[in-house]
Amino acid sequence: MTHQLEIRNLHATVGDTEILKGINLIVPRGELHAIMGPNGNGKSTLAKVIVGDPEYTVTQGEVLVDGQNILEMEPDERARLGVFLAFQYPVEIPGVTIANFLRLAMQARKAEGEEVSFTEFYGKLQSALKTLEWDESIVERYLNAGFSGGEKKRNEILQMLMLEPNYIIMDETDSGLDVDALKIVARGVNSMRGPSLGGLIITHYQRLLDYIVPDKVHIIVNGKVVQTGGPELAKKLDSEGYDWVKELATA
Amino acid sequence: MTINPEVNEINKEYEYGWSNPERYAVKAPKGLRRDVVEMISRAKDEPQWMLDFRLKALDIFYSKPMPTWGADLSGLNLDEIYYYIKPEGANARSWDDVPDDVKQTFERLGIPEAERAALAGVGAQYESEMVYHNLKEEWEKLGVVFLSIEDGLKEYPELFREHFATIVPPEDNKFAAINSAVWSGGSFVYVPKGVKVDIPLQTYFRINAESSGQFERTLIIIDEGAQAHYIEGCTAPAYSSDSFHSGVIEIVVKEGARFRYSTIQNWSHNVYNLVTQRAAVYAGGVMEWVDGNLGSKVTMKYPACYLLEEGARGEVLSIAMAGRGQHQDAGAKIVHFAPNTSGTIVSKSISKDSGRSSYRGLVKIYEGARGSQTNVECDALLLDDEARTDTYPYIEIEEKDARVGHEATVSKINDEQILYLQSRGLSEDEAAGLIVRGFIEPIAKELPLEYAVELNRLIELEMEGSVG
């Protein structure tokens, strides 16, 4: 089995509008790739399609997780295969504590008849909270309810640390974060990096990539990958802007 | 015990729909008639004043029209109901003395087990009579009284008569009149001054026979500075013909006392559940109703707090869930008679399929009840496009120096919430269930743990297959 996230000629529409127009990408485990590009060109759509948002219709192509096409699967089946999306706008679920939610989400990954043990849960939680510099009392709060933008993003990373996915997709996790929060989020992600973790870091700006250094950078314009390079590509975008890549897309 | 296959379809999520063969000591003929009322009174060997009370109530019943507001009651044929069914065996203090099939019923409902684990006392009513009533010795020694209502009348005639029907008189409404005429079963509770019963008392109501009515009458007196918590549960077999439950609950919360009455109503979907529950609250006393309405075909129930003296406080927390063919017309009443009294109403409803939930509530502040206030919050959650919810808030304020706050929200489970939870590995059903559990959490957390778990479990059962 090939341990990689592979996207083959992916086309997707919302309503009548085609947004993804043939994306091709391979992210092996052990690598984090940045996805950059101007707003409104399909970066977040790619994230939503991988996670299985029913708002989007895939018209062509495949998404293979460790060789298995996931496009016919429910979002929860994809999650259980180890795909995790850190949402750009995490929703609020009033009345459900983070602790309860995390336990249920961990339980959902267990085989029938297996229980999440208290020591497993609590041990992981302690270590995750420490990485994120968060007090334990946070887990008694309701899921994202009344959270600031920064708290919501940090909560995404908490879930990521607890659920130990194989592939992470971070959808503009840096938007709306100040530098301190950015560092904390990056520390969380970096603590998970290793040979078993692959993923996509979707961002408009270079600054998150100062803290999470990507193995590769892909630029998406008008629903297609128009350029791929190393971390230096992100720096180039930062200094020169996106105008030159837009030209690539029309070329 | 038999399953009733013809109604399995409408009650397929309902797990208490089995019934026992009918074997009864007394089964009165159908219909609400003078001879039936007399028969009940005779069977209970009552004093003359009670028979007179019943017969007067029967006249009041005849004189009052059926209510035309609230839920649709046109399917309820009062002539087709059995008003009194006395099961075999007497009101026992030991489960060993309860007839086998009845005992098995309550065992299946988990009552004796709960009693051993976590309750101060338990009562069990089967059809029209209490078949079991017992209070743990430690509470009896402190002077707590927990009896069937009939034994309360026999053993504490003065205390009984001082309070009986003073809070809900038969004139109050047509169903209070029915209950007053044919009442049978229910609890009589007295907690003496300063005694704090810190684990709950529970009574469980089971209807077994087809087309039958249950008309329990409960009278609870919490003396000065005392505290207690009483829990009521109920189920019935699933029949294709309708059954009728119309209880009257009267509560006296004296000065500085504190009392909570919790209900988890889970009647089968062929029961008309028309109940009058009211508490009179004296100086500095606190009354809390925690009301969960999950079952029944139609429920009309508005737990009330009459705040009679300064500093009295009343709270009503209610949850209603209405599925296909159900109408939960539930709410609350807070009436301020005295200065500096306060109230809170939190009502949450969940509707799905063609189910309908209505919040109907009255807040009334009489002139002179200065400095009083009540806050009302009602939130409705709709699970699909067929479901319906309405809000009928009645607010009557005669006092200038008083405040009433009212907030209402209607929401739908949104797709983004479902996707978010699914993306973490929960199935679509689990996701919807979790959102609903979160919605009712502010009320579920007020229940003892076992009951909160039971409430969540029942809601999950009702939710199965309700999304997607």
Image (cartoon, rainbow, N blue to C red):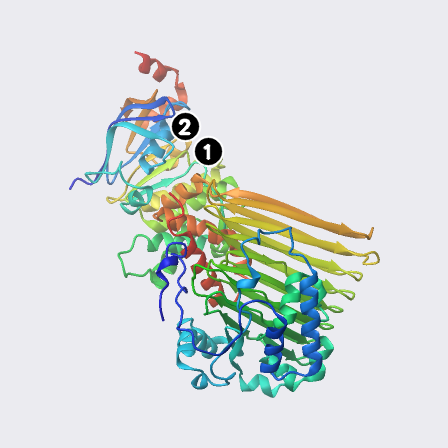
Residue type (three-letter) at the residue carrying disc 1? Ser
The residue closer to the viewer here, B96 or A239, is B96
Q: Is residue B164 visible?
A: no
Left-right relation of B420 to B217: left
The disc at residue A204 is 2
Give the residue at x 51% y 50%: B350
Residue type (three-letter) at the residue carrying disc 2? His
Which residue position holds label 1?
A: A175
Find out whether the residues at labels 1 and 2 contact each other: C-beta distance under 8 Å.
yes
The residue closer to the viewer here, B333 or A78, is B333
Query: Which residue is at the far top?
Result: A251
State the quadrant of the C terminus of chain A.
top left
- Percent x, y for residue B347? 59, 53
Identify the element where label 2 is drawn. Answer: loop
Task: Categorize mark 2 by other alpha carbons within 10 Å: few (<14), some (14-19), many (20+).
Answer: many
Disc 2: host chain: A
Q: Is residue A116 above or below residue A82?
A: below
- Percent x, y for residue B401? 82, 52
Q: Is residue A54 above or below residue B236?
A: above
- The residues bearing labels 1 and 2 have C-alpha atoms spaced at a distance of 8 Å
Left-right relation of B201 to A189: right
